Amino acid sequence: MPETNEVRATGRRKEASASVWIKPGTGRFTVNGRDLEDYFQREADLILIKKPLKLVEKLGEIDVKASVKGGGLSGQAGAIRHGLARALVELDPDLRPVIKKAGLLTRDPRAKERKKYGQPGARKRFQYSKR
């Protein structure tokens, strides 16, 4: 089996989980078999995803293939960014200090708060009636 420079990493955010494969190439970006701009229409999501590549100045040099499931589009974008940052560090360990300083290797722990019993939501209370 020939040795390739393809690297795989996993990223997570909220309920979304993404597997990201990167290899040196021409800058192609596919998500679940579709083009990046076709899958994510919001400009904010596109900027969020491309941040690790822009940070290490490899935007047009690396092909990215991502498989993402669960959550909504915003959570999926965060999961891809997390996976991409981890994959870049695995591809070139010298990039770790730069990516770590930008906070891209830290998994965002924020998630939806659970609903509590005896009330309609996580924080919402039933209406109080004095009389």
Image (tube, rainbow, N blue to C red):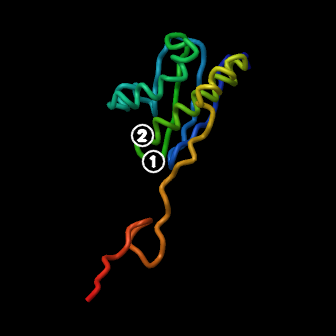
Question: Percent x, y for residue 83?
Answer: 58, 32
Q: Secondary structure at mark 1?
A: loop
Residue at 49% in and 14% down: 27
119 vs 102, left or right, is left
Question: Percent x, y for residue 7?
Answer: 65, 24
Residue at 46% in and 25% down: 30
Residue at 67% in and 18% down: 95
Report the amino acid beneath label 2: Ser
Figure disc tally: 2
Residue at mark 2: 74
98 vs 112, left or right, is right
Vertical order, 126 against 38 (above or below): below
Local crowd size for mark 1, using a 10 Å CA cut-off: few (<14), some (14–19), many (≥20): some
Report the amino acid beneath label 1: Gly
Taking the view exactly as shown, the residue that stands out farthest to the left is: 131
Quadrant location, the C terminus: bottom left
Q: Nearer the viewer, residue 20 or 81?
A: 81
Residue at mark 1: 71
Of badges 2 and 1, nearer the viewer stands: 2
Taking the view exactly as shown, the residue that stands out farthest to the front is: 130
Q: Secondary structure at mark 2?
A: helix
Quadrant location, the N terminus: top right
Q: CA distance from mark 2 to mark 1?
A: 8 Å
Q: Verify CB contact (< 8 Å) between mark 2 and mark 1.
A: yes
Find residue 91 and name its label: none
95 vs 71, left or right, is right
Question: Percent x, y for residue 34?
Answer: 40, 29
Residue at 51% in and 16% down: 54
Which of the 4 quarters of the picture holds residue 17? top right
